[in-house]
Structures are given as C-alpha cells and as structure tokens.
Amino acid sequence: MTYADLFPLKKPVVAVIHLLPLPGSPGFEGNLQRVYDQALEEAEIFQKGGVDALVIENFRDIPFYPEKVPHETVAAMAGITREVVKRVQIPIGVNVLRNDADAALSIAATTGAHFIRVNVHNAAMLTDQGIVQGKAYETLRKRKNLGSHVLIAADVAVKHAVQLAHLPLDMETRDLTERSLADILIVSGSGTGQPTDLGHLEAVKNNTHLPVWIGSGTTPEGLSDLSKWADGFIVGSHFKSNGKAENPVEPKRVQEFMKIQKEMR
C-alpha cells in the first residue's frame, strides 16, 4: 500500500491517541480496561470529527525507555491497536516511545495498522533518556523480512532532543530520504505542542521528494502559513481541553479544526 493509497486527500490530519499509562509504567492505575475504553472512545471521537488518520502512542509511560520497551508494553499496545483498527475505518499508525521501532513495526504488521512513527531513524540524538541512536538498517530489513507494507514516518531533528554533533538540516533530510529510506518525514517544534519553525519546514521540504508532515504545534491560526509547505499534520495537544496534551480530547475542538482544514482543501 502506497502513501497515495492511504492518504488520497491532500494534507491529511493525523490525530494522536495518547494512551493512559500502561502496565509496568509508574503511572499505571491497575485498570487495563480503562486504557482500552479511553483509546476506543477517542478513536470514535476523532473519526466522527473527520480526521484522516490516527497514531497510537504510549505517551504517558514516562519516564520512557530509550529504545527497547518491555514485553508488557508491546502486548498492551498490540491489543489496543488491534481493537482500534477494528473499530474505525481510517489509517492507523503506531509510535512506541521513546524509540522502539522494532516494537512499533511488529505491532503494526500484526494488527493491521498502516504506518509507524520513528523518532530517531538515523544518526544519534542526545535526549532526556540519554543517547538514542537510529537503527534504520534493522527497521528496513525487518519490514522486508515480514513482507510488510507498513510505512515509516521519521522525524527530522526530533523534538525533546539535540544533536550530538551539528548536522545541517539539509544533510539530515537527504540522509533520511536517500540512505535511511523513510517514507514520510516529520518536522516538529522543540517539544510537545511547541510550534514548528517555518524555516526548518522549508529547508526540509526543499531537500526531499517525500511527504513532509508537521509533528507539533499546529493550530487553526497557523494552518494557512504551514500549509504552504506541509503535506500533512500530526495534531495531539490542540485537540485536548485547553490545548494541553495531558487533558481529555474535546470533540468540539476536533470538529472546528477539521472544518477549517476542509475549507482550506
């Protein structure tokens, strides 16, 4: 399945399902059914609100493992992802934080999900989890061995991180495109909900033929400017009460955002 197959409309909006804390994480409250219920409730809100796709991530499993997450996290995310895939009729993505591309790809390939997000797909970044290194060489070979068509959305200069050594944005973009074989590129602000720099977005867009998505900070007020360069938008915080990522999804905010986006299309 190609990008055009998954996203036939221009400039898709991808809403984020921020899962409640999963078993094994410090914040888990002991009720796994509640995690399932909230994920499914949010999936239905987003679909009814008109978003084009969803991405499921273990956003509240802080502090994150830098790379490999434990088996219970994979099992929980696989179960939830499968239920969401069965419940809605829009593409589903998986992001296993902080950077377990192997788990994300395994979950997506076995649950019927359609794409994964990889925070660090190549090179290395200094993060609050320490040094996180990209493993495109493993991810691409695993996808091949699984016979999977799951797309890989990779971050450029990912948020909540800094480079170990300066790598120009144009070079990182070309490496992700030509050497690490990503399918989609993501440009974000410095942190969750932070606005994306238009200069960074323009630089990335000018150095790749791939679709480029905005990964953070998209609001209705900024859609017009961002749409000049962006091919899609991942929206998490704005869809929550008061625009805060930790709050519940607010259906009215989803509907109002999508109304503006559809008029712009």
Image (cartoon, rainbow, N blue to C red):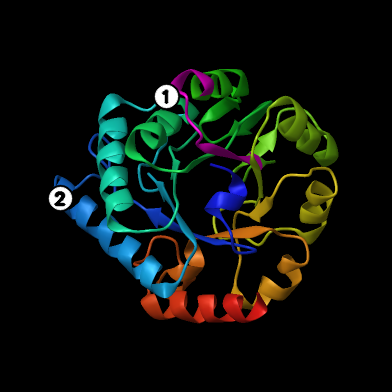
Q: Note whether 219 is above or below 120 in the view shown.
A: below
In the rendered image, which residue does mark 1 sit on?
68
Residue 226: quarter of image: bottom right
Q: Note whether 154 is above or below 102 in the view shown.
A: below
Q: Secondary structure at mark 2?
A: helix
Calculate the distance from the C-alpha at mark 1 to the C-alpha at mark 2: 24 Å
| Point 65% across, 31% down: residue | 125
Q: In the rendered structure, find residue 236 and report the number of the disc placed on it.
A: none
Q: Amino acid at mark 1?
A: Lys
User: Position of 75 compared to 66: left or right?
Assistant: left
Location of residue 76 in the rendering, given as x and y in whole percent from the top left corner: 25, 38
**Lower position in the chain sequence, tag 1 or tag 2:** 2
Along the viewing direction, whichever of 136 and 119 lies nearer the viewer: 136
Image quadrant in which the C terminus is located: bottom right
Location of residue 25 in the rendering, given as x and y in whole percent from the top left corner: 28, 38
| Point 68% across, 73% down: residue | 222
| Point 30% across, 33% down: residue | 73
User: Position of 50 compared to 13: left or right?
Assistant: left
Examine the structure image and report whether residue 152 is included in the region drawn in magenta: yes
Q: In the rendered structure, find residue 33 and report the number of the disc placed on it.
A: 2
Q: Residues within 10 Å of mark 2 (few under 14, many from 20)?
A: few
Examine the structure image and report whether residue 145 is included in the region drawn in magenta: yes
| Point 32% across, 45% down: residue | 81
Location of residue 109 in the rendering, given as x and y in whole percent from the top left corner: 40, 33
What segment carries the magenta color? Answer: 144-155
User: Position of 257 compared to 222: left or right?
Assistant: left
Along the viewing direction, whichever of 26 and 80 lies nearer the viewer: 80
Q: Residues within 10 Å of mark 1 (few under 14, many from 20)?
A: some
